[in-house]
Image (cartoon, rainbow, N blue to C red):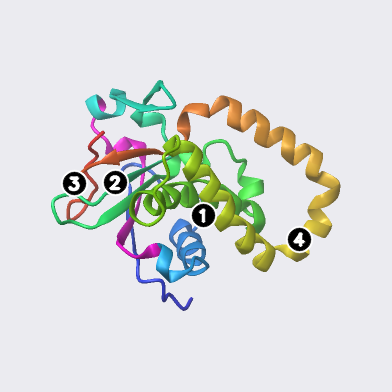
Amino acid sequence: MNIDHGVIVREAYKDYTAPIEVADVVNRLLSAVPKERLVGLKTVVLTSSQNLSKPVRKSKAHARGKSYELGKCRGQYHQEWKNQPAWIELFVDNTLAGWPLTMLRVPLFRDWALADVLFHELGHHIHKTQAPEFKEQEDVAEQWQRKLSRPFFRRHHWYLWIVVLPLWPFVRIHRYIKKRKEKANHGLESTGAPPAAEAPETHP
């Protein structure tokens, strides 16, 4: 794969083995993002919720006026802190938990599972560094998630919709159930330090 997006993608799991090549998918997704939208973003860390200490996993993060356990989130954006670049943390175990392995073997659904959270967190970065809006930050991140996802899927998966279209009602049902069960797992923005040398440090 020709990786020219300039963002470091690093895997740092603990007692977890991803069922797919997550780094390859994330690199492909980042390669489809206009480079100007990645300015200031240094690293995407692929990790598991078990990398967090128990107190941090149980700690509360806040979005839309509600509290969520950090250990149940799918991702987190860490803005620039003390002259250290911004970075994104993806909890791969939580991200893939609602997806059957048979679906993840299909490139369309594999990309979909990771694009949903990666582009959401990237939306936080764009909102914070390039396109500030006086709106609920989670709403803005979701808007950017859609803006970044559409061109990627139109370019890379247009042919698969011929196959998927008859199954689309079932896909929508699955996604609705997944969203309901994992409502707390949307990425949450955090101000925190950059990752340590081997594993990320989370600062809710």
Mark earlier in primary sequence (2, 1): 1
> Extreme right residue here?
166
Mark earlier in primary sequence (4, 2): 2
Mark earlier in primary sequence (1, 4): 1
Of residue 186 and residue 132, the one placed in the foreground of this image is 132
- Residue for point 78% across, 57% down: 161
Q: What residue would you read off at disc 1?
A: 20
Which amino acid is tagged 3?
A: Ala
Q: Secondary structure at mark 3?
A: loop
> Extreme top residue here?
66
Task: From the top left corner, tell me how far across and down residue 140 is, in percent.
Answer: 48, 43
3 vs 1, front mark: 3
Magenta stretch encompasses residue 169: no
Q: Secondary structure at mark 4?
A: helix
Task: From the top left corner, tell me how far across and down residue 41 is, in percent.
Answer: 32, 60
Determine contact: label 3, label 1, CB under 8 Å: no
* Residue 193: assigned label: 3
> Extreme front residue here?
134
Of residue 159 and residue 24, the one placed in the foreground of this image is 159
Q: What residue would you read off at disc 4?
A: 160
Which amino acid is tagged 4?
A: Leu
Mark earlier in primary sequence (2, 3): 2
Whether 48 is drawn above or below 68: the answer is below
Q: What residue would you read off at disc 2?
A: 78
Figure quadrant of the C terminus: top left
Q: CA distance from mark 2 to mark 1?
A: 25 Å
Query: Is 136 placed left or right of 41 in the picture?
Result: right
